[in-house]
Image (cartoon, rainbow, N blue to C red):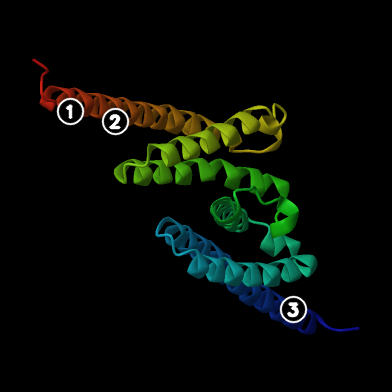
Amino acid sequence: MPNLKAILTLVRRELVLRDELREQSQGDMQKVTSLSKHAILLIHQKRLEEAEKLVARAGETLSKLWDTSAAHPDIIYTGMFSAALQEYSEANIFLKLLEESRFTTPKEIQVPSTDYVLGLADVIGECRRLVLDALREGNTKKAENCLHTMDEIFIELMGMDEAYTLVPGLRRKCDVARKLIEITRGDVTQEIRRSMLEEHLKKVEKNLKKPRRT
């Protein structure tokens, strides 16, 4: 039988290996989060091909984490991993909306439903940025379409009554989303009214410049 020294030598070796694995996994989680955040910035800059590449790299790193999770679930399943999955979900959903005008599924991007739902809730904030960009460009139609997407996501999430108890953090995100939608609707409405008034004034000015018949 091995003596205590031999036993503890093996234990120490295992602890060191686990610590190295934990550090490596945390680095990969941070990489997934960072790549996903950068991809979202590129999407807003209309650099979709570059965003696709970053999302793909994030997916490859995520695959390594899933492989590690099979043998070491206690190391992988942490708040940091969940945050990475949410950011990755958000980037994928947002990218697919702009490229194909559809919502990607949890199965397509291989993320748990909980993290997918939380990432989806964050897409509402990205859509608000699209609305503001569209308004600056004077494209009220695009702004209205983006607002419609924000409404759609929010309404569908609110329709998942049981999700509030099954998905921690969803209620808070929906509360934030509600405020964002209210503010955004006000911005869009104000710009539409301004555009209508401007158009009306142009017509009045045009009519005033017409020569009067005698």
Give the mark, 3 or 1, whose residue is nearer the N terminus: 3
Of labels 2 and 3, the one closer to you? 2
Give the mark, 2 or 1, whose residue is nearer the N terminus: 2
Check disc 1 and report the residue beneath it: 206
**Residue 204 versus residue 122 in the image, above or below:** above
Task: Assess disc 1: are there few (<14), some (14-19) or many (≥20) residues with their C-alpha within 10 Å of its C-alpha.
Answer: few
Q: Nearer the viewer, residue 158 or 70?
A: 158
Residue 22 in sight here: no
Q: Secondary structure at mark 1?
A: helix
Give the CA separation, mark 2 to mark 3: 76 Å
Q: Secondary structure at mark 3?
A: helix
**Residue 93 versus residue 58 in the image, above or below:** above
What residue is at 63 percent from the left and 71 percent from the top?
Answer: 61
Coordinates of residue 141 in the picture (x, y in percent): 43, 38
* Quadrant placement of the N terminus: bottom right
Coordinates of residue 173 in the picture (x, y in percent): 53, 36
Compared across the picture, whether 36 is left or right of 9 comes to left
Q: Amino acid at mark 1?
A: Lys
| Quarter of the rendering containing residue 136 | top left
The label shown at residue 8 is 3
Q: Are marks 3 and 1 in contact (CB under 8 Å)?
A: no
